[in-house]
């Protein structure tokens, strides 16, 4: 029987970035699900603070070279790869000098959100999908970690809805307390329109706050899972109101088998429908 394919997309992953709730979960869960019998791929941004020499990143020339247009501007897409030998898995890095060269990840030295985080998120999500297509690898499920991946379900359901490569791909969003404090750029909705999103999405995301973006995407995901043990009240309300398949927080020692089975359920549910 062919292995189910799970694409893990995370805004950070250990050991390339320091341990955090998201970085550690993405690292451990991807390995655990692989050991539970799934075929996996892992994608993350190549932030400038990642030490390429220490982690032996190298560019994958055959996957690099295309340009993505964000808000009517061309941005070169560079793909790099590194291995986590202890886990026997590779990690693909989405790179672009303008978006990811800076030495901080999501905020500057003063802790202020970068003004272009909306475009960075759009570039990361689209760059991941375009690279997966170039790999010729069709994911059954995309498991998203961190708000930089929040738009993934919208791209799959709207922009890539007629792309045969993703015809059967389901999206599961892993909810964490970590959000952003500053609304995305006031022109965010206009950028989505330029990127091919319909009026329904554009209108729904004119409020570009973390809470509203999270609430909107839950209408388009195929599954929701919880990454923070004590999810804050607003996110808990969004989780409870969602009508998709859901799985609440699972203790770390039980996650590998439980998540593998949940992904099976998401896939099987779509087949039944």
Image (cartoon, rainbow, N blue to C red):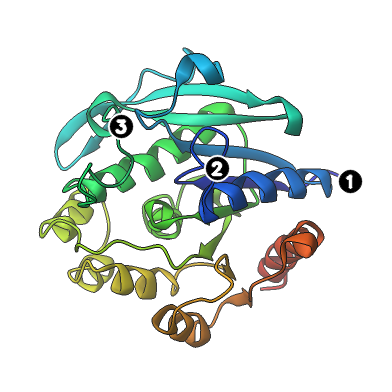
Of mark 1 and mark 2, the one earlier in the sequence is: 1
Q: Nearer the viewer, mark 1 or mark 3?
A: 3
- Left or right: where 86 falls relative to 17: right
The spot of residue 212 in percent (x, y) is: 29, 74
The spot of residue 54 in percent (x, y) is: 53, 17
Of mark 1 and mark 3, the one earlier in the sequence is: 1
Q: Name the image quarter holding residue 119.
A: top left
The reply to whether dot 1 and dot 3 touch (C-beta < 8 Å) is: no
Instruction: Return the residue at label 2.
Output: 165
Q: Nearer the viewer, mark 1 or mark 2?
A: 1
Give the alpha-carbon distance from disc 2 to disc 3, as whole Å: 27 Å
* Mark drawn on residue 1: 1
Name the residue nearer the viewer: 196 or 148: 148
The spot of residue 22 in percent (x, y) is: 52, 53
Q: Name the image quarter holding residue 235.
A: bottom left
Residue at image coords 19%, 45% = 116
């Amino acid at each position: 029987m062919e292995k189910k394919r799970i694409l893990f997309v995370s805004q950070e992953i250990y050991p390339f970035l320091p341990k955090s709730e998201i970085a550690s979960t993405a690292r451990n869960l991807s390995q655990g699900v692989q050991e539970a019998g799934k075929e996996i791929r892992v994608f993350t941004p190549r932030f400038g603070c990642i030490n390429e020499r220490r982690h032996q990143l190298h560019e994958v020339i055959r996957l690099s070279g295309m340009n993505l247009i964000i808000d009517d501007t061309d941005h070169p897409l560079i793909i790099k790869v590194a291995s986590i030998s202890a886990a026997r898995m590779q990690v693909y890095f989405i790179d672009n000098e303008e978006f990811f060269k800076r030495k901080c990840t999501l905020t500057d030295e003063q802790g202020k959100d970068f003004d272009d985080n909306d475009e960075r998120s759009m570039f990361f999500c689209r760059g991941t999908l375009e690279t997966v297509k170039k790999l010729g690898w069709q994911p059954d499920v995309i498991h998203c970690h961190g708000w930089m991946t929040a738009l993934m379900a919208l791209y799959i359901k709207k922009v890539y809805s007629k792309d045969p490569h993703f015809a059967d791909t389901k999206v599961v969003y892993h909810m964490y307390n970590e959000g952003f404090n500053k609304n995305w750029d006031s022109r965010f909705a206009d950028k989505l329109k330029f990127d091919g999103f319909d009026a329904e999405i554009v209108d729904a995301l004119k409020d570009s706050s973390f809470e509203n973006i999270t609430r909107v995407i839950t209408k388009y995901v195929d599954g929701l899972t919880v990454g923070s043990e004590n999810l804050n009240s607003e996110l808990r309300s969004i989780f409870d109101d969602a009508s998709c398949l859901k799985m609440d927080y699972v203790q770390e020692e039980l996650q590998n088998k439980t998540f593998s089975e949940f992904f099976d359920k998401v896939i099987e549910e779509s087949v039944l429908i």
